[in-house]
Amino acid sequence: MEVAANCSLRVKRPLLDPRFEGYKLSLEPLPCYQLELDAAVAEVKLRDDQYTLEHMHAFGMYNYLHCDSWYQDSVYYIDTLGRIMNLTVMLDTALGKPREVFRLPTDLTACDNRLCASIHFTSSTWVTLSDGTGRLYVIGTGERGNSASEKWEIMFNEELGNPFIIIHSISLLNAEEHSIAILLLRIEKEELDMKGSGFYVSLEWVTISNKNKDSKRYEIIKRDILRGKSVPHYAAIEPDGNGLMIVSYKSFTFVQVGQDLEENMDEDMSQKIKEPLYYWQQTEDDLTVMIRLPEDSTKEDIRVQFLPDHINIVLKDHQFLEGKLYSSIDHESSTWIIKENNSLEISLIKKNEGLTWPEIVVGDKQGELIRDSTQCAAIAERLMHLTSEELNPNPDKEKPPCNAQELEECDIFFEESSSLCRFDGSTLKTTHVVNLGSNQYLFSVVVDPKEMPCFCLRHDVDALLWQPHSSKQDDMWEHIATFNALGYVQASKRDKKFFACAPNYSYAALCECLRRVFIYRQPAPMSTVLYNRKEGRQVGQVAKQQVASLETNDPILGFQATNERLFVLTTKNLFLIKVNTEN
């Protein structure tokens, strides 16, 4: 069986700035424009049965504003009337109203368990759309933004089961056969889950194709499902359709569709709820093993053989337990008896009194140790010298313990250790794995729409942007940009909701749940002479931080960044913040 290659992300040292001094707050006003919407954004609030953290990550923090990366400064949202509304900006001082480009044929309010409608811009002429009820639309749009050729026409429309959101899609053209691959996300109930939240995350990789070039009919040719226990931070299909990359806290695995899926679930659950083969407990002098006997068992059905360092138990001519004991026993004094509750009780007398056994038979994990309260108290007493109720009981000693109250937010090690996995599209096996450790995932951005989306990770105090290249097997992830100290800065923003950056890396921005937007610009040359007071040297570049406060009390529902502008969507308004002026 092939084993996935363990890889690492290679940081480009020239892109790091060890002399970065921080962001200087700039009070320069940012031009801000406000557009009132004809109809409110189609926000779907979480229901009472969507109570887990995964529901909040996937649907509660959903970005309702969508950026068309194939066309500059073009954003879309879906309103309560089921209309897909578009705003394309040419000139800030001559903003028009958002225009309707398509209307969903179904009534969104008729479905009780619907999710938010989602849209993804597959190519310059194709769009994938979900109405949030479980129906997938694939739409041919023509050249968007060109009034002469733009026409949104449904090319595929099918019910695909439980409601989902679209997280990525690509368009493929091979030997005149056109196909579209789409990645769908669901959070589904797991009835037999005895532990955890009772839900699992499903990623469905659907491929539709038009095999007959003379016909406009598209049909599903492939459906694969991955299952995991956490909502992925990032998931994208490779441009050639041969693989899939996922950044997630908990791992994903492919499962077979249909009946085999149910069998896999039953198999997994049977392993989870499988009872121990036997129970055992110990004192300083002896051990007691308890075994549940089959019904109608008699003394003649049981054979127990004791040796100084070996035991053999046979029940009804079947080998039950056999192997080398952890330590020696007094085999002549060891006994067994059938109890009234149809169980077999075996008493083993220790040769080495006071020795604690971690297991009965060496290497056997089928038994479960039962500790009584007296043993637990004794263990706690032996460990007492390692703990203290006081934070720092002896501050004068040579090496005082670490004081957690002195840690800053950026010093805290994240308990969540995510991983980046690459799956092969044909074998459905993991081919590459990167353990991200404490490199916290921050956001994703489309730099080149023909490539996979980039993802931004925290490295120490900085934020590093990575571009996946599926064609380069030896160097699959390229470090393309660095946002200095942004990892440190964003940690202090407790109310942050959305994170984004310009495709040309000129700035990064984040917004809070209400009103405030923070912009962090890359270092730029100074027009005036500036000196560092402490070192007396001239400062050539300064990185600016700017803050914009929106004139609204409505919560922010969407956030997108382009090279020149920030777009911020609330329930009833769309705001434009002019960040850069085109050179």
Image (cartoon, grey):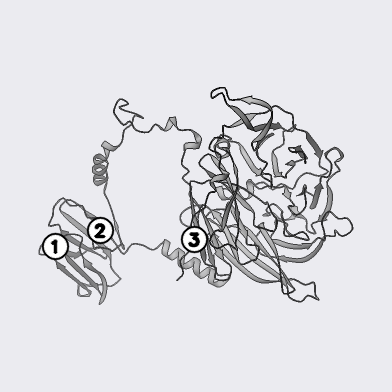
Which percent across, then down, holds residue 303? 19, 72
* Mark 3 element type: loop
What whole-number distance in Å separates the C-alpha atoms at marks 1 and 3?
42 Å
Amino acid on which disc 2 is placed: Glu
Give left or right: position of 319 versus 74.
left
- Identify whether 260 is placed above or below 517: below
Quarter containing the C terminus: top right
User: What residue does disc 3 label?
Assistant: 192
Q: In this view of the protein, can residue 52 be seen by the observer? A: no
Residue 442 lies in what quarter of the image?
top right
Q: In this view of the protein, can residue 437 be seen by the observer? A: yes
**Which label number is shown at residue 334?**
1
What whole-number distance in Å separates the C-alpha atoms at marks 1 and 2?
17 Å
Tell which circle, 1 or 2, labels the residue nearer the N-terminal end.
1
Quarter containing the N terminus: bottom left
Give left or right: position of 575 versus 496.
right
User: What residue does disc 2 label?
Assistant: 359
